[in-house]
Every structure is written in C-alpha cells, then in structure tokens.
Amino acid sequence: MATQRMARIFRSATAVIGSLAMASAMVMAAGATSASAQNNSNTASPAASAPTASLPATVSAPTAAPIAAVPAASAAPAAAAATGDADSIPAGTTISTLNWSQYQRFMPDGMAALFAGTYFWKMPAAAQIEVGPTIIHPLPKNYMTATEKYAAQVKVVALADGGLTLSGYQGGIPFPVPDEPNRGWKVLANLWYRYLPHLIVDTYAHGCLMTSGGTINCKTAEIISRQLAFNTDPGTPTTYPDAEGKFATEYFMVQEPEQERYTAFLSIAYADPARAEDTYLFLPQLRRYQPISATARCSPNQGTDSTQEDYRFGYNSNITEAQVQFLGEKKILALLGANLPVGEFPDNYTMPLGWPMPSWGKWQVRDVDVISVSKIPSRAAGYCYGKRVMYVDKATWAPLWEDLYDRKMQPWRFFALFLRTVDVPGVGPVDASGSMVWAFWDVQNNHASFFIDPGEGHQLYVNEQAPKEFTDLTRYASAPGLNLIMR
C-alpha cells in the first residue's frame, strides 16, 4: 500500500512540475516561413532562406566587438543615440495606439499583432513606448579575450541524427560573425553561450497567471543559476574541478503558496552539448528526488505559460536537436536597462494587457538577428512547439522577444523579455544578468503570465555578492542535493 501511495503522489506531481519555474517565451512571426531542414554539413549549401517580406531591409553585421547595454541610470554613458533616419527612431519619440503603424517595421511580429488588435490580448489605449537613445558598451573584457583566443578554432560538426554540434569551444562567443553555412544555428549557439554571470541567486522570483476574466494567481520561488564550465568571470575557475561534466545548472524551489512549498527541481546542461539535459524533481511528500522524463519538459508550469524549454532566461533546449533557419537582420524596439515595476502585479503595469508603463524606462532600437528554431525531424515527434521565432540582440546575444507557434504552425504565445541591467562585480553593467520581467501572452487560450526577477523588496545576487551558502555545489548543483531540502 505504501508503494501504491508513493506512486500516486509521484503521478500527481506531474502537474506540480509546472510550478517549478518562472520563465517562458513565445510570440508569433507573421510572414515567416516554417523552418526547412537544416543543412548538416559544414560546407554544403546553407539551410537558411532569404528574409521574409515582413522583415525590413537588412542591416550590415557589426564590425566592432559585440556589446551590452548600459544601465539607464548610468551617469554620462557612452551612448549611440538614434539618428532619426529611416533606419531608426529619434530619441524622444512616443509610440502609442494612434501612431504605431508608422513604426511597425521596428516591431517583432507579436508586438505588432498586439497593437493591431488581432487577438483577445491587445494594446490598451493608454499604452506608450517612449524611445530613448540606444546605449551600448562592450561585453566583459575576459569574455571577449576568450572570444579572440578561441573563436577561430570553433567548428560546426554534423551529427548522425541530423543535428549539429560544435567542436573546439573553450569560452567567449563561439561565432563572433555568424555566416553561412548554418548561419541560423551559429546565432543560436551564440545565444546559448552568451555571457551570463557564473552565479545568479534570485531570492524571491515572483510570477503571476492572469486569466481573460482578470483573475490573478501568483507564486514565488528561489532560483539559483550557475555556470560550471567555460567561465570567464575574474577569479572564477574556467571549469570547476568538481563540475562532473556540467555546463550549467538551474535550481528552483517553490516558496509560496504554502501547499507547494519545498517542491523543487534541478535542471542540468552539460559541457558536451550533445549530451541530453537531466532534470530532477523533489517532492516534499516523498522527501526525495526523482528524475523526470524529457517529455515532461513541455508541460506547462501549473497553469502558467512557461515550460522548461523556456528557462535559462529565454531558451533552454538542446541546441544539437535544433533545426534553425536564419530569417534575416532587423532593428526592433526593445526595453533594456529597465526598472522593475514597483509593487506586486498588476501594480504599475498598463492593464488589462500587462504592458510596461513609461516608468519602467526608455525603449531602445536594437539590431537583432531573427531566427526560426524547431526540432530536427528525428526529435520533433510530440514536441510542444512547432517553431520558435527569436529576435536575438546582436550586442549581447540575448533573446529580446520570441514568437512561439504550435505544432500546426499557428501563433500560440508571445514572449517579451524586458531586461534589467545589473552591475556585476569586476565586470561592469550587464543586461543579460538574470534580472528582468518576462511576459507571456497566450493568444489561443487567452491567458497571460508575468514573472518578475526579483520581486520588489528582495535581492538578486550575482557572483561574489551571493551569500556563501549558495556556493555549495552539492546542495544547489547536484541531484542528491535536492534531498537536503527540509533537513
């Protein structure tokens, strides 16, 4: 009987998996073609097609090193202000529901659909986008040094199952100037290996689900993200001696509501990208951890609009299983250097959509690569998303907006990432810091989710700012460490 009871508890926990994280993404991309089969050869013809008609004229690739945005509050930053020509938007411009069509070419397709009122979720009349200068500065010095040292040796390698992997990667940007063949996949690899602080501790991640009727349910969690290999932060081992082949881990433990407290999961990605990611679940009823199947990664997070595939700040899927089409280059409006909203959701959001208020900060015009990501045919069966159209910032390689489609290639969710800049010790201001607001609008089921990292009045620590307890690799970066919960 005890065995049957434990089995029932574990089966019921599949629904709880959904409450184990606060991040997800998706939006739509009108006019983008479905991803074609990606070329597996390093020398054969590229899989990418020409940019779709919905994309503007392409912009040239940057010749300078990739750069990250400066925080909005910085004094006298080195700024590149919008020039006001046809390829940009003058600083000081205010975009609203009255004039948005003039600036549609600077919008991701999902954002344009919100302004157009295509779906239940639509832009409120009070919504405004106040445009400021595009403010950028170099990525961390050590990260760029690793790029200069190792990028020339990084190669794309074809796998037998139709996927791609890379060899020779040791740190930094694997493909500083992604080109054909396999240009789209190289952009995705740059995103996967983008600079993030090696330790991010979010003590109070706050997430809320909102229904079409305005009902709001919220949860909080503690999230610890670490990078254990290919590190470039000052004073940090390139690879931790006891990393056991791990590249990155994400630990998540529910704090509220009380009935779900101590439910936790651990996600492990490996330095060998072809090795499947492992995910473990800790159930307080059983007081022990269990591995969960790969199919559970597509499970919605207890009624929210996120899945494990959307973690790690916008993308957490195995890149060797990805078929990637390069759609083109584009300039888009994005909110970086954002101030987190004061109060709890929906305070200081433009309702009923949940759009950022002007108090969050000025928007920037950013250069992005647009890619369409799907599963290779041998891995596509049963997968939740038909494709994920990603707008990847050329300066930071971070996703700024994503359009997610269902398996019938119909728009499903719009996912916006509003990035908060954090001053990383010994590094400087970093936009891809793990601190942000994530917003998801499900245009098929008419609900939305919002995640604030961290919630008001709580801390997000990076690197050596983190209290010593969070540096315990056994506790926060290994499956057996889950069993230490509640002890």
Image (cartoon, grey):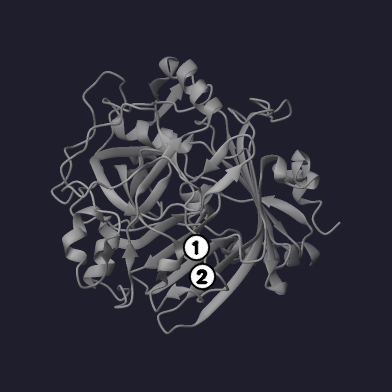
Where is mark 1, residue-wise? 300
Which kind of residue does numbered mark 2 sit on? Gly
Residue 303 is marked as 2
Badge 2 local density, few (<14 within 10 Å), some, or many (20+)?
A: some
Q: Front-most of 409 and 286?
A: 409
The residue sitting at 50% across, 48% down in the picture is 75
From the viewer's perspective, tell me whether residue 4 is left or right of residue 69.
right
Q: Residue 441 lies in what quarter of the image?
A: bottom left
Quarter that holds the C terminus:
bottom right
Q: Position of residue 410 (x, y in %)?
A: 27, 60
Badge 1 local density, few (<14 within 10 Å), some, or many (20+)?
A: many
Which kind of residue does numbered mark 1 sit on? Pro
Q: Front-most of 75 and 198?
A: 75
Q: Position of residue 456 (x, y in %)?
A: 62, 66
Q: Residue 163 lies in what quarter of the image?
A: top left
Whether the residues at callouts 2 and 1 have beta carbons within 8 Å, the answer is yes
Q: Position of residue 146 (x, y in %)?
A: 52, 22
